[in-house]
Image: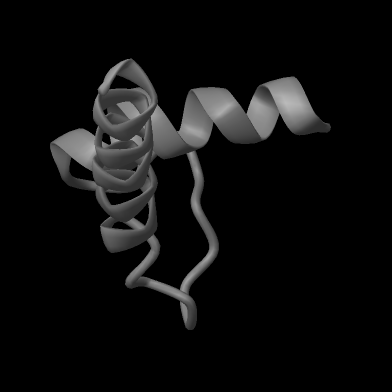
Amino acid sequence: MKKRIVLVLGLILLMTVLTGCTEYDQPITPDSKGFWNEYIVYPLSLLIV
């Protein structure tokens, strides 16, 4: 039962992250608009680079 809950929560988290990846034709910069780009995607891109 716990494995099923962890799997469902993991899939929900993955789906949430992937839904933020819609602006594939524009670079993400500090001036990017939107909550997702400003507070989630841009800081994560700094961690990757």
- Is 40 on the left-hand or right-hand side of 43? left
Horizontal and vertical percent position of residue 46: 68, 26
| Residue at screen point 34% across, 46% down | 11
Q: Identify the colour scheme used.
A: one colour
Horizontal and vertical percent position of residue 29: 50, 45
Q: Nearer the viewer, residue 11 or 25?
A: 11
Horizontal and vertical percent position of residue 37: 32, 42
Quadrant in the picture for the C terminus: top right
- Is 31 on the left-hand or right-hand side of 49? left
The residue positioned farthest toward the left in the image shown: 34
- Quarter of the image where one finds residue 10: top left
- Is 48 on the left-hand or right-hand side of 13? right
Say if 26 sits above or below 16 in the image. below
Quadrant in the picture for the N terminus: top left
The residue positioned farthest toward the bottom in the image shown: 25
Say if 16 sits above or below 45 in the image. below
| Residue at screen point 30% across, 54% down | 15
Say if 32 sits above or below 5 in the image. below
- Quarter of the image where one finds residue 13: top left
Q: Nearer the viewer, residue 33 or 7?
A: 7
| Residue at screen point 33% across, 71% down | 22
- Is 33 on the left-hand or right-hand side of 46? left
| Residue at screen point 26% across, 40% down | 8
The residue positioned farthest toward the right in the image shown: 49
How many callouts does the rendering have? Answer: 0
Horizontal and vertical percent position of residue 40: 37, 29
